[in-house]
Image (spheres, helix red, strand yellow):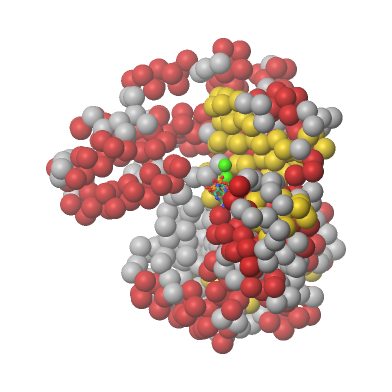
Amino acid sequence: MSRNAEVAALFEEFADRLEADGVEYKPNVYRRAADNIRAHGRPIEGLAAEGKETVEEIDGVGDAISSKVVEYFETGEIAELVELRDEMPVDIQALTGVEGVGPKTVGTLYETLGITTLDELEAAAEAGEIREVKGFGPKTEENILSNVAFARRAQERARLGDARPLADDVLELLRGEAAASQVEVAGSIRRWRDTIGDVDVLVASDDADAVVEAFTGWDGVSTVIESGPEKASVRANGVRIDLRVVVPSEYGAALQYFTGSKNHNLKLRNVAIRRDLKMNEYGVFDVSDVDDPDAGQRVGERVAGETEESMYAALDLPLVPPELREDTGEVEAASEGDLPELLESGDVRGDLHTHTNWSDGRNSPEEMVAAAEARGYDYYAVTDHATGPGMVGGVGLDDDELREQMDALREVAADAELELLHGVEANIGAEGDIPTSDDVLAELDVVVASPHAALDQDPDAATDRLVRAVEHPAVDILGHPTGRLINDRAGLDIDVRRVAEAAAEHDVALEINSDPARLDLHGGPAKTAVEAGAAIAVDTDAHRPDTLGYVRYGVHTARRGWCEPADVVNAWALSDLRSFLH
Ligand code: DGT
Ligand code: CA
Ligand code: CA
Ligand code: ZN
């Protein structure tokens, strides 16, 4: 596994600390470098070993940063960063995790009140000390107080998009072990929850020692938390990973048990009991002839356990896809033969929400289209930002620029193998208004409308706002409907059913935004939306070619929402999509 993410995080911390110190300009240079290091195709440790000139092949990385990268791999630290930490010993990551608290605020609160941790921040807000600081007031203090709890919870759970690449690295490592006959993730990561408490990994093997040794010896591990004969726990990139090794004959039972959720398993166990069966992490056992079924774990005749399928089959059920195992009706649907035929990644025919360097994307339309073609898409929409509330620093396109882009994209489309659609991501004002002119919207192929500002409205106002946006005749897709950023910002608290009913009535699709920082809508609300009759669009919101790959997170999130291909507009043939669009 490469260490690009680790180094990127260091430079992000560096940027925050410089900004807390009042340094200007340089923090943004460091953040841009961090982004590029994270996205770079080659492992940073390899580049560093070849020398600083090689590190400079990464965009935005010059002399100063490359020297620090080399220093980090040679000495294990960056002296200048250590100095910054000593000068201002604040938990910068935790504090900036509070919505409304940026690095500058951290600096000010440290200088004036000596605040270094979340607990101290909360105590100072409760004591009314923050409102007394110059530039702060009672409203800011109140906001900080109400956002601390959210930030604290956020620290406990990793985002799926941070945990999944780690899990993939562990899977690859263990699948390369001769002693491991089967390897799979279990727990919430196999169910593709949007946040992950810890990553669970399950291995079938007759030589547990060898598997545990390979796992704890993996070079991605920062700490070994515990290590025993059949299990071990480590920390890697701040995420806890639990390994369990079982004998091959009990692998299916363990996989079923440790995939959870607890409530899904509880419901299944009750189904089993009604049939005189006992179901646990070792198998399914026929206990009809057993006097005391609680006498042990492996009592009675074993009827299933080697495969997960056998576990469900023993209860006369089809295998329930992991994404559905939340006890939201899946066991009932399985027993009635009514499980949905879930969306699969191969069903996705195009992406309807993406950006280019015309707004805040990194690449040209040509480069993005080439990446979309490489994915085998039939169609692809460029939807750069329009100006409006939430767009800062001239990012969004005004009406004239959108017209100019129409001409430019017509030329790109002429050379493209796929069908290139020209769209826009328009902004939804606080009242549900859309500032881009109706004429321009009408000329575009696809209109995504998204909320980017005023994200702390009360539920009624927020719901009315989105309903009004959906009623706009030009709108095709409601982009990242709540505006949440996982672990960062709660977003709009909407009545999804009411928005979805309006969307169904006006032929607007609700987006599942696949960016792992968003996953918005996520599974539960997506299920509600589909039940209310709304169509869904699984989009990546990509700002670079490689983040078109986020579609993976969107597809699994759609599966958590019980979405079938017929529910998802970008799984439709182009002609059907065209007649859906305004
Ligand atoms: P997480 O890690 O908080 O994101 O969520 P999970 O679902 O991965 O939970 P975790 O890691 O505590 O345990 C993994 C699975 O193991 C869980 O989904 C179901 C199963 N499991 C763990 N403890 C229990 C238990 O006490 N009872 C039952 N029925 N199942 C359990
Ligand atoms: Ca877990
Ligand atoms: Ca666990
Ligand atoms: Zn957006």
User: Quick check: 415 left or right of 16?
Assistant: right
Q: Does residue 43 lie above or below 379 as drawn?
A: above
Res. 419 image quadrant: bottom right
Closer to the camera in the image, 476 or 461:
461
Taking the spot 35% from the left edge, 67% from the top edge, the residue there is: 457
Q: Position of residue 18 (x, y in %)?
A: 40, 29
Taking the spot 73% from the left edge, 29% from the top edge, the residue there is: 208
Q: Quadrant of the N terminus?
A: top right
Q: Quadrant of the C terminus?
A: bottom right
Closer to the camera in the image, 464 or 33:
464
Toward the top, the furthest residue is: 75
Closer to the camera in the image, 540 or 261:
261
Q: Does residue 81 lie above or below 327 as drawn?
A: above
Q: Position of residue 370 (x, y in %)?
A: 79, 54
Res. 495 image quadrant: bottom left
Q: Position of residue 331 (x, y in %)?
A: 64, 68
Q: Position of residue 224 (x, y in %)?
A: 57, 25
So how many labels did they put on this image? Answer: 0
Taking the spot 46% from the left edge, 52% from the top edge, the residue there is: 393
Q: Does residue 552 lie above or below 493 as drawn?
A: above
Q: Is residue 366 visible?
A: no
Toward the bottom, the furthest residue is: 505
Toward the front, the furthest residue is: 291
User: Quick check: 180 left or right of 503?
Assistant: right
Q: Is residue 458 visible?
A: yes
Q: Does residue 193 lie above or below 581 as drawn?
A: above
